Image (cartoon, rainbow, N blue to C red):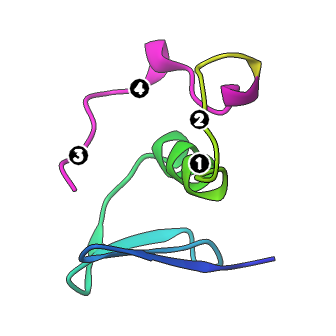
Amino acid sequence: MSQRFHFGPCVLDTATRELRRDGAPVALQARVFECLEYLIGHRDRAVSRGPGMGVWDVANLAAPAPV
């Protein structure tokens, strides 16, 4: 199920797999997008970097792009 999440000046669109800030697209690595999508989808509770965060292998991520 695709959704759009609005927060501050940003919109995360799960259908197009895109993050926009003030209407402009923000370049994200696929894993960074997946992590952001996971965190937003589970915003009702605290999330640790344990097994539930398998989408994010920190060792394989480059420096994140500023949002």
Of tags 3 and 2, the one toward the viewer is: 2
User: Which quadrant of the structure image shows residue 57?
Assistant: top right
Residue at numbered disc 2: 46
Q: Which residues are magenta?
A: 52-67
Image x and y of residue 61, in percent: 41, 26
**Residues at discs 1 and 2 in contact (Cβ within 8 Å):** no
For marks 3 and 2 on the same chain, the one whose residue lies earlier in the sequence: 2
Q: Position of residue 9 (x, y in %)?
A: 24, 77
Count of all numbered marks drawn on residues in the image: 4
Give percent across and percent down for residue 66: 18, 49
- Residue 65's disc is 3
Which disc is residue 34 wearing? 1
The residue nearer to you, when weighing 17 against 67, is 67
Q: Quadrant of residue 2?
A: bottom right
* Three-letter amino acid code of the residue under disc 3: Ala
Quarter holding residue 49: top right
Identify the disc placed on residue 54.
none
Q: Residues within 10 Å of mark 3 (few under 14, many from 20)?
A: few
In space, the residues marked 4 and 2 are separated at their CA atoms by: 22 Å
Estimate how packed mark 4 is, as few (under 14), some (14 to 19) or many (20 or more) residues with alpha carbons within 10 Å: few
Q: Is 32 situated left or right of 16 in this image?
A: left
Residue type (three-letter) at the residue carrying disc 1: Glu
Instruction: Return the disc, 4 or 2, that comes first in the chain's sequence.
Output: 2
Mark 3–mark 1 Cα distance, whole angstroms, equals 14 Å
What residue do we see at 62% from left, 72% from top? 14
Residue 44 higher or lower than 57, as above or below: below
Q: Residue furthest bottom?
A: 23
Q: Is residue 43 above or below residue 4?
A: above
Magenta region, mostly helix, strand or loop? loop
Q: Tell me the residue that label 4 is attached to.
A: 61
Question: Type of residue at label 4?
Answer: Leu
